[in-house]
Image: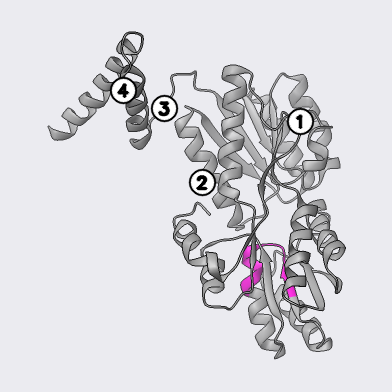
């Protein structure tokens, strides 16, 4: 009975909030309170149609980074009364086919990554020809506008790489190994190029098979053993930071391990000093804002960014910030 009364109270608050909004200064607050209560119960905070939005990414299987992106997208979808669909493939051709499938399903909006933009161009053009708004997220900031997307939400990978180079300079580092775990990913190339541009020391790229962690570990370890002058290893994804730590131990190296991206494990290792720093691009925010942008466009023809990418990073995270962010990382929002 108590639960029934709570639900009735929420419903009445919504009705009263709407009916009184035009004649009382308290009406807007009541409506807002009703929306917040509805969202807390896993129900939409708006009464717009139940549009369907598909997100298609270049993620490989088991990449926990995309769990965080999805978490943000799903929370925005609840708020916006969106039916959210997610699919992924590390193979560019298959990713393009997933976009084509979403177009065939006549979804109301598409969110897509452009890690390998050339392979995605025709599929995105087909979506736009069908009148489906497209938002690019995470990778592809340079190509997003040219491909006709509403906006791009993520970090500029070159700027992020430069931020790493600047931080390495502050730390007095001399020689860095930049570990690329997905060949052909333009964002990864831009990150390492950015590091090289800003870093006063030398940078060497190491290409590894990111789907095979034992191979990643042995490749990094072999490089550290053969070149003792390497004093920094930069990984391009949070899961690879822990592997690099193990490789460092195998090689008997004292190189600092730094990484792009943040998760709970990285936050913990920053806190205890195992890692030097991380570059947070706020993946939860990327997913949330991408879904919200589709809703805003469908509801009110709004766009954000003014024709420029909407940047969610980079933010350099060190031991000093790790404790604060760890609690958010543990709940899956950072």
Seen at 64% across and 27% down, the residue is 109
Q: Residue at (73%, 72%) from the top-left corner? A: 170
Residue at (72, 75) in percent of width and height: 171
Q: Which of marks 2 and 4 is in front?
A: 4
User: Does 146 lie within the magenta span?
Assistant: no
The residues tagged by marks 1 and 2 sit, at their Cα atoms, a distance apart of 26 Å
Q: What stretch is highlighted in magenta?
A: 233-242
- Residue shown at the point (81%, 46%) measured from the top left: 116
- Give 135 or 84, whichever is nearer the viewer: 135
User: In whole angstroms, how far apart are the C-alphas of marks 2 and 3?
Assistant: 17 Å
Q: Which of marks 1 and 2 is nearer the N terminus?
A: 2
Q: In this view, does 47 lie to the left or right of 319?
A: left
Rendering coords of residue 162 (x, y %): 79, 59
Of labels 2 and 3, the one closer to you = 3
Q: How crowded is mark 1: few (under 14 residues within 10 Å), some or many (20 or more)?
A: few
Q: How many labels does the image show?
A: 4
Query: Residue at label 1?
Result: 307
Reading the image, the residue beneath label 3 is 45
Reading the chain from its start, which is encountered first: label 4 or label 3?
4
Camera sees residue 265 = no
Of the image marks 2 and 4, the number of the one nearer the N terminus: 4
Which percent across, then down, holds residue 329? 49, 58
For mark 1, give the secondary structure: loop
10 Å neighbourhood of mark 3: few (<14), some, or many (≥20)? many
Question: How far across and how far down the image is residue 18, in percent?
Answer: 34, 14
Query: Going from the N terminus, do you reach mark 4 or mark 1 first?
Result: 4
Q: Mark 4 points at which residue?
A: 30
The Cα–Cα distance between marks 4 and 3, rounded to whole angstroms, is 13 Å
């Amino acid at each position: 009975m108590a639960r029934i009364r709570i639900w009735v109270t929420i419903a009445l608050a919504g009705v009263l909030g709407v009916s009184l909004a035009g004649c009382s200064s308290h009406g807007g607050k009541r409506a807002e309170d009703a929306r917040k209560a509805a969202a807390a119960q896993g129900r939409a905070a708006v009464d717009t149609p139940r549009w369907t939005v598909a997100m298609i990414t270049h993620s490989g299987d088991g990449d926990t980074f995309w769990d965080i992106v999805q978490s943000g997208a799903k929370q925005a979808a609840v708020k916006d009364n969106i039916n959210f669909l997610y699919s992924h493939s590390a193979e560019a051709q298959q990713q393009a086919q997933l976009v084509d499938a979403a177009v065939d399903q006549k979804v109301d909006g598409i969110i897509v990554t452009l890690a390998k933009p050339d392979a995605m161009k025709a599929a995105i053009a087909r979506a736009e020809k069908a009148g489906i708004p497209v938002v690019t997220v995470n990778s592809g900031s340079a190509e997003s506008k040219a491909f006709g997307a509403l906006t791009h939400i993520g970090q500029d990978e070159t700027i992020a790489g430069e931020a790493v180079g600047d931080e390495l300079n502050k730390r007095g580092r001399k020689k860095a190994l930049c570990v690329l775990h997905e060949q052909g990913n333009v964002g990864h190339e831009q990150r390492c190029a950015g590091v090289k541009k800003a870093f006063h020391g030398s940078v060497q790229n190491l290409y590894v098979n990111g789907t095979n962690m034992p191979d990643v570990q042995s490749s990094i370890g072999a490089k550290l053993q053969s070149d003792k002058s390497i004093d920094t290893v930069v990984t391009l994804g949070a899961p690879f930071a822990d592997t690099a730590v193990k490789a460092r131990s195998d090689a008997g190296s004292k190189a600092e391990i730094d990484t792009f991206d943040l998760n709970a494990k990285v936050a913990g290792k920053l806190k205890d000093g195992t890692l030097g720093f991380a570059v947070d691009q706020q993946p939860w925010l990327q997913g949330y804002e991408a879904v919200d942008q589709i809703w805003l466009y469908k509801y009110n023809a709004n766009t954000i960014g003014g024709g420029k990418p909407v940047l969610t990073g980079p933010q350099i995270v060190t031991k000093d910030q790790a404790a604060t962010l760890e609690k958010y990382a543990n709940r899956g929002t950072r």
